[in-house]
Image: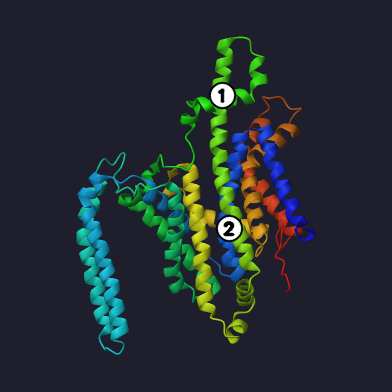
C-alpha cells in the first residue's frame, strides 16, 4: 500500500478539485470536465504504451483519433438509401479494383521474384488501376454528394449500436497503424515523428474533404449515444418523481403551486443533464479501469520487461535474439488502437463528428504534454497527466477571472485596467498552464508519478 501512497494522494487531490468545481460552479460542468479527463486518460494510455514502453515517438495521435470518430459515423448512423442507389455500386466496384490491384502486385512480387520487368509491370498495374478508379469514382461521388447535401450528401453508416463503433474505432486505427508501421518503423526516431505527424495530416485531410464518406466539414450531428436523452428523462414520470423526492425540503419552502411547479421543472432539466453525464462517466470509468488493469499486468509481465529492454537498448535486445521490428510494430498497433477507441468515445460524448476540429499540429502535442507531465512509463502517471492538463485547460479562465477580481477588488467597475484584465481572462489560460507546467517540470522533471521499475 505504501508504494501507491503518491498515487492515492495525487488522485485524491484531483477528485477534490473536481468536487470543488461542482460545489462552486455546477455539477454539470464538473462532470463534463471529468468525462473529458477520462477520454484524455484513454489517449494518454495509448501514447504511453508507445513511448513509455517502447520509446516510439508517434506524432500521429490526432489521425487515429479522427479514425475512431469516423467509425462512430460509419457504424451507428443509419444508411442513406438514396445515396447508395445513386453511387454506392460505383464505390463498391472501386474497392474491388483496389483489392485486385493489391492481390495482383502481391502475387507478382512473390511468384516472379527474378522477373526482369517486374517493376514495370507493377507500375502499369498501378497506373491503369488508378485511372479506372478515377473514371468510376468521380461520377459516383458527385451523385452521392448531390443527394440532399444540406442534410445528408453521404452514404451514411450501418445503423448499429453506438457502443459497437468503439470497438470498430480501435480496429480502424489498428489497421491503419499496421500499414504505417510496416512502412515507417524502420525510420530513425526523429524521422518517425515527422512521418507520423504528416500521415496524421493526410488522414484528417481525407476525412475533411471526402464529403461522401462523412459529410466532410459539413459535420454529422445527432449521433446515437449509449445514454438516455435529456428530453426523454424530462418527460418520464419516474425521473420527475425522483427529482422531487431528492428536493423535497427545498420545494416545501415554496407556497405558490405555480412557482413550485416552475422550480420543479427547472430542477428536472438540470438533473437530466447531470444524469446523462453520470451515465457517460460510468461507461468511461469502466473503459479506463479495464485498460489500466490490462496495461499494468502487461507492464510487469515478461513481455513488458522485454519491451523496456528494447526501449533502453535496442542493440543489446537484438543481440539477445529479440525481434525488435516485430515488437515495435505490435506496440505501435496496440497504442494506436487505444487512441482510436478514445476518438470514438469523444465523438459519442459530443454527439457530433466535426473533422475540422482535428488539428494534429496542435492537439497531438497536448496529449504528449499530458504523458510527460504525468510520468512517462507509468500508467497511473499517464492517466493523471490527462486529468491535470485537461483540468488546467478548462479551469484556467475561471481561475484567472477569480484572481483578477481579488486583486482589483478596490478598483471601481468602470476602471479601464480592470475591464481590460477581465476581458483578457480567457487568454490567461496559456499563462497559467505554462506556469503550472514549468513548476511541475522544475520540481518533478520525471513527471508527477515517475516510472518505477519493480525488480523480480
* Quadrant hosting residue 182: bottom left
- The N terminus, quarter of image: bottom right
Residue occupied by mark 2: 291
Residue lying at the far top in this picture: please name it.
256
Whether residue 60 can be seen here? no
Kind of element beneath mark 1: helix
Nearest the eye: 120 or 4: 4
Disc number at residue 241? 1
- Left or right, 420 with reference to 175: right
Q: Residues within 10 Å of mark 2 (few under 14, many from 20)?
A: some
Q: Residue drawn at (60%, 42%), measured in percent from left and top?
A: 33
Whether residue 115 can be seen here? yes
Q: Give above or below for 309 relative to 426.
A: below
Earlier residue among tags 1 and 2: 1
Distance of label 1 from label 2 (alpha carbons): 37 Å
Q: Residue drawn at (44%, 69%), measured in percent from left and top?
A: 178
Q: Residue drawn at (41%, 59%), measured in percent from left and top?
A: 203
Q: How many marks?
A: 2
Please report contact status of discs 1 and 2: CB closer than 8 Å, yes or no: no
Q: Residues within 10 Å of mark 1 (few under 14, many from 20)?
A: few
Amino acid at each position: 500500500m505504501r508504494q501507491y501512497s503518491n498515487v492515492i494522494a495525487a488522485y485524491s487531490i484531483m477528485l477534490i478539485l473536481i468536487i470543488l468545481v461542482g460545489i462552486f460552479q455546477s455539477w454539470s460542468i464538473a462532470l463534463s470536465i471529468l468525462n473529458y479527463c477520462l477520454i484524455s486518460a484513454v489517449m494518454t494510455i495509448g501514447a504511453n504504451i508507445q513511448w513509455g514502453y517502447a520509446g516510439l515517438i508517434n506524432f500521429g495521435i490526432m489521425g487515429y483519433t479522427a479514425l475512431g470518430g469516423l467509425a462512430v459515423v460509419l457504424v451507428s448512423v443509419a444508411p442513406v438509401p438514396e445515396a447508395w442507389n445513386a453511387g454506392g455500386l460505383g464505390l463498391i466496384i472501386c474497392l474491388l479494383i483496389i483489392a485486385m490491384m493489391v492481390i495482383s502486385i502481391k502475387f507478382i512480387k512473390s511468384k516472379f521474384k527474378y522477373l526482369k520487368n517486374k517493376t514495370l509491370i507493377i507500375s502499369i498495374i498501378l497506373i491503369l488501376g488508378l485511372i479506372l478508379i478515377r473514371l468510376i469514382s468521380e461520377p459516383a461521388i458527385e451523385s452521392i454528394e448531390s443527394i440532399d447535401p444540406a442534410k445528408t450528401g453521404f452514404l451514411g453508416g450501418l445503423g448499429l449500436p453506438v457502443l459497437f463503433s468503439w470497438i470498430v474505432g480501435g480496429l480502424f486505427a489498428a489497421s491503419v497503424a499496421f500499414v504505417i508501421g510496416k512502412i515507417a518503423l524502420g525510420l530513425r526516431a526523429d524521422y518517425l515523428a515527422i512521418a507520423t505527424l504528416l500521415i496524421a495530416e493526410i488522414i484528417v485531410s481525407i476525412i475533411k474533404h471526402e464529403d461522401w464518406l462523412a459529410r466532410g466539414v459539413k459535420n454529422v450531428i445527432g449521433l446515437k449515444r449509449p445514454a438516455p436523452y435529456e428530453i426523454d428523462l424530462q418527460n418520464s414520470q419516474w425521473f420527475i418523481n425522483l427529482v422531487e423526492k431528492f428536493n423535497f425540503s427545498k420545494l416545501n419552502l415554496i407556497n405558490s403551486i405555480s412557482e413550485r411547479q416552475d422550480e420543479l421543472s427547472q430542477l428536472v432539466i438540470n438533473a437530466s443533464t447531470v444524469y446523462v453525464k453520470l451515465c457517460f462517466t460510468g461507461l468511461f470509468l469502466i473503459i479506463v479501469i479495464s485498460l489500466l488493469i490490462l496495461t499494468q499486468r502487461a507492464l510487469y509481465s515478461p513481455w513488458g520487461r522485454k519491451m523496456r529492454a528494447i526501449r533502453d537498448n535496442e542493440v543489446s535486445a537484438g543481440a539477445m535474439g529479440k525481434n525488435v521490428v516485430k515488437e515495435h510494430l505490435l506496440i505501435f498497433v496496440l497504442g494506436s488502437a487505444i487512441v482510436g477507441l478514445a476518438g470514438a468515445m469523444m465523438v459519442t460524448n459530443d454527439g457530433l463528428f466535426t473533422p475540422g476540429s482535428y488539428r494534429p499540429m496542435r492537439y497531438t502535442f497536448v496529449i504528449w504534454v499530458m504523458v510527460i507531465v504525468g510520468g512517462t512509463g507509468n500508467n497511473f502517471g499517464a492517466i493523471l497527466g490527462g486529468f491535470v492538463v485537461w483540468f488546467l485547460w478548462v479551469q484556467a479562465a475561471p481561475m484567472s477571472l477569480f484572481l483578477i477580481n481579488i486583486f482589483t477588488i478596490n478598483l471601481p467597475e468602470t476602471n479601464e485596467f480592470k475591464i481590460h484584465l477581465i476581458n483578457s481572462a480567457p487568454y490567461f489560460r496559456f499563462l497559467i498552464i505554462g506556469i503550472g507546467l514549468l513548476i511541475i517540470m522544475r520540481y518533478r522533471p520525471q513527471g508527477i508519478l515517475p516510472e518505477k521499475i519493480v525488480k523480480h
